[in-house]
Amino acid sequence: MAVFPAKEKAIGMYRTMYKIRKYEESIYYLFLEGIMPGTIHQSTGEEASAVGMLYDLRKDDWMASTHRPAGHDIAKGISVKAMMCEMFGAEEGCCGGHGGAMHTGDISVGAMTANAIVGGNLPIAAGAALAFKMQGKDNVVVCFFGDGATNEGSYHETMNAAGLWKLPVVYVCENNQYSANTSIHLTCCKENPAADRAECYGIPSEVVDGNDVLAVNEAATRAIARARRGEGPTILELKTYRHGGHSRNDACGYRPDAEEEEWIGRRDPVKNFRQVILDHGAATEEELAALEAEVEAEIDEAVEYAKNAKLPDDESALKNVFWEEK
């Protein structure tokens, strides 16, 4: 069983988890009402994975995300205001309004721009880790990917190189049981598609309850310390579950009712960690309610700001697209 942390850390972790949950909820309704453009791939239900992995990471450590990046980006330090502006295509968005939901990021806080190609961020993270190693730095890269990415060629090629070169990278498989609408059990003969294959690459691995933020954080601490010492990569497989569909048009008709009741009804990471905090006396019901009200006000303010924020100039569509010799 994971050790309960200091009060300040526990409350900080809960605040970020609740912020991610409320951000995703607000995005969902904005899309549902037709107020926000584009499409979404949400991380609701996977908050413990993002916060547990990134809470203790240094600002100059880097993080590589997927097509479901909101939780990772907020946990790494991007403001909800910058994220919301990006969702509205505004100039003050974290990517200048050019990225949209699947391409958020801000390298100033160590969040590499998210990569929407399944498995596409794996070799990029390895490249960043190789650069840190060649520069003699002790920085670490944390790279998230889904269970579906473990069947991509980029996964096996990258893991082989990362293990061989002992790169300072932690590869985090958020195993939410499904690749789009296909169960991982229909596409992989292993129970743990990432962890069970790790030995082939000479990389140590752990299987962790991805809905227990404290268990994730302890595993992260071990893996990050190992990478920082120059001992090479670790593969962490976090068992979790997305509450919504693969994207906004997915009604999840392929998921059994009993499975959803177990993961969403009984294993909700935000609701359960809230109760853990109360059980340990780290905060009262009134204190948590006040914290939640602050977060909700921050989200509401970000939405209203982003709705009225300036859009990029037309000329900016060509920015960062073509390289011109000076």
Image (tube, helix red, strand yellow):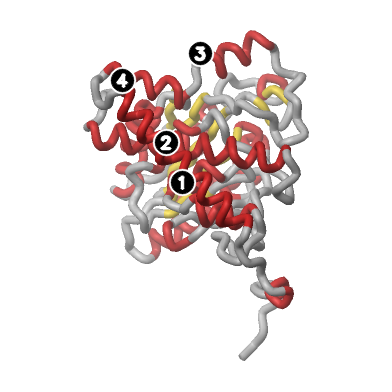
Which residue occupies the foreground of this view, 78 or 254? 78
Answer with left or right where residue 222 lies relative to residue 268: left
Q: Amino acid at mark 4?
A: Leu
Task: State whether residue 52 appears in this view.
Answer: no
User: Cα distance, mark 2 to mark 4?
Assistant: 17 Å
Callout 1 secondary element = helix
Query: What SS does tag 3 mark?
Result: helix
Residue 67 % position (x, y): 64, 45
SS label for mark 2: helix
At horizontal 65% and vertical 20% (from top left) the residue drawn is 189
Give the mark nearest the N terminus, 2 or 4.
Answer: 4
Do labels 3 and 2 touch, CB within 8 Å? no
Q: Amino acid at mark 2?
A: Ala
Other residues around mark 4 within 10 Å, as few (<14) / some (14–19) / many (≥20)? few
User: Eyeballing the image, is 227 above or below 106?
Assistant: above
In the image, what residue occupies the spot 66% across and 33% down?
148
Residue 5 visible, this orientation = yes
On residue 278, which mark appears?
Answer: 4
Q: Which residue is mark 3?
A: 266
